Structure formats: C-alpha cells, structure tokens
Amino acid sequence: MLEFLQSAEEAARLGGKVLRSWSTRFSVREKSRANLVTEADFASQQAIHEFLGRRYPQHGFLGEEGLADERPDSAYRWVIDPLDGTTNYVHGFPYYCVSIGLEKDGALIAGAIYNPISEEMFLAAAGHGATLNRQPLKCSAVDDLGEAMLIASLPVATTPEDPAVQRFLRVLGKAQTVQRTGSAALNLAFLAAGRVDAFWSASLKPWDMAAGVLILQEAGGRITSLDGGRFRLDVPSLLATNGSAIHDQLAGLLY
C-alpha cells in the first residue's frame, strides 16, 4: 500500500509540474457554461496516466477529462483529477491542485493531493494516517457551528433558485463564516489539516472527492451524504466535517 502511495505522490508532482509549465501559455474553452477547461488539464492527465500506466499496466483508470480505462479483471482503479480548480488556475488564483486516489475493490486505499503553487503535498494510505509534507494531519476540534469556518460547493452556472444556493443561505446565518473556494479536493485536504471545520456539496464527481475523502478519514474526520446517511463516491452528495457535533447540526440544516 505504501508503494502505491509513493506512486500517487510521484504522479501528483508530475501533474503539478505540467500545470506550472502551462501556466502562461494555455487557452481556455467552456465544456459547458462557466465550466472551463484548458490544455493544461489534458496535458496533466496524459502525463499522470502514462506514468501510472507504465508502472501498473493492469490497473483501471478514471479521469475527469474523458479518461475511462476500465479493467474489469483488475481490483485496482486510479481516480484522477489532473486540475481541480480550473477556473482558479485560469485567473491565477493559487487554490488549485492535482488529486489522485486509488481504489481496491471499490475501497479507497491511497490518495495524494498536491498544490503546485504552495508545494503542499497531502497524502494518506488506508490505516496509516494522513500527512502534509510528511507531518501528521488532524482535524480541528471546533464543535459549535457558530464558531465554525465552513466551505460550500455550488454548481457552476448556478441560479438563485438552485437548491444548493438555498442550502448555502440556510447555513450562512448559523456559522461563523461560509466560503466558496473552487477546489473540492483542496477543501477536503484543508479540512483534514484543521484549517476549516466542514465542507459540503451535492454536485461533485468521483475524481473531485476520491483522494480527499481518504485523507480526511485518515485525519479523523467524518464523511456522510448530505442527510447524514452512507457516503458513496459515485453519488454527488457529500457532507464532510471534523467529526464533531457540527456534523449532525449541518445534516439537519442541509437536508
């Protein structure tokens, strides 16, 4: 398992190097309204896929930019977001990352999240804890919603009538502060590091969450669906917290 984690780290650093190399020369297009993609997204994914594919040719792969290399006979699948926070990347806002998770028989066993601007590497292996640049991670101890810093993920091109906006507004007056940042993977990593106290979304894909979910769990956090039920990686319903009493408080507000 630790060998897989080392591979995830190396691949994430490789993807980050690609993102830095494209940072002043990319062009932008919309996959859908306000949903941006650049050459950097594709170049990072290709580099990661080729690197891991050479090392583990029998493994399956799933990536945001059209990568679906399924291997039904393999127990392993790498779940890759080559650039989580593309809009931030496009605007030069330094809150984006490479996110790589590894599943075995559907269970997450390794994860790496790398911010190439801050050079922060968040890592976790199942049963071995989580680290930031080799230092152990632990969630915050905040247990009062009125003292909590929260992050909400809203869909791109959302409208005021969207249920996600209504959920945001219901929580806004209860928490100390609620932010929207643009990178779900980093949100989960920051939650694991104790920098924020909770994060929720109803619009994420597996590649947004895979690595971050494991990192948070290994740092002592709690993850459920928005209503407090069982979390599933393939269902866009996520409530992630430091594991304190604010989890159930938020579940009551969000669902």
Image (cartoon, rainbow, N blue to C red):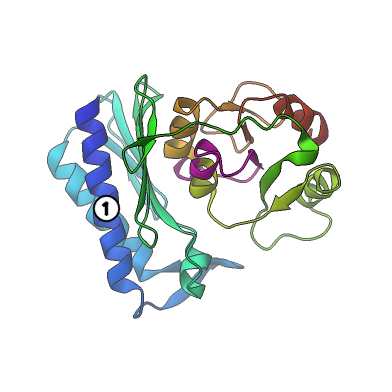
Tell me if mark 1 has few (under 14), some (14-19) or many (20+) residues whose alpha carbon lies within 10 angstroms of its own: many
**Taking the image as drawn, is residue 112 in sight?**
yes
Question: Image check: 236 left or right of 94?
Answer: right
Image quarter of residue 5:
top left
Residue marked by disc 1: 13
Vertical placement of residue 11 versus 129, above or below? below
Question: Image check: 194 left or right of 197?
Answer: left
Let me know if residue 203 is in the magenta part: yes
Question: Image check: 67 left or right of 149?
Answer: left
**Taking the image as drawn, is residue 59 in sight?**
no
Residue in the picture at 66% in, 54% down: 155
- Quadrant location of the C terminus? top right
Vertical placement of residue 220 versus 152, above or below? above
Q: Which residues fall within the magenta stretch?
A: 189-208
Q: Nearer the viewer, residue 220 or 209?
A: 220
Vertical placement of residue 113 versus 237, above or below? below
- Across and down, in percent, residue 45 comes to 31, 55
- Across and down, in percent, residue 222 comes to 58, 26
- Across and down, in percent, residue 10 comes to 22, 46
- Across and down, in percent, residue 126 comes to 37, 23
Image quarter of residue 161:
bottom right
Residue in the picture at 35% in, 79% down: 24
> For the residue labelled by badge 1, is the local secondary structure a helix, a strand or a loop?
helix
Question: Image check: 104 left or right of 84?
Answer: left
> What count of labels does the image hold?
1
Let me know if residue 243 is in the magenta part: no
Image quarter of residue 77:
top left
- Quadrant location of the N terminus? top left
Residue in the picture at 53% in, 53% down: 183
Say what amino acid the circle numbered 1 marks.
Arg
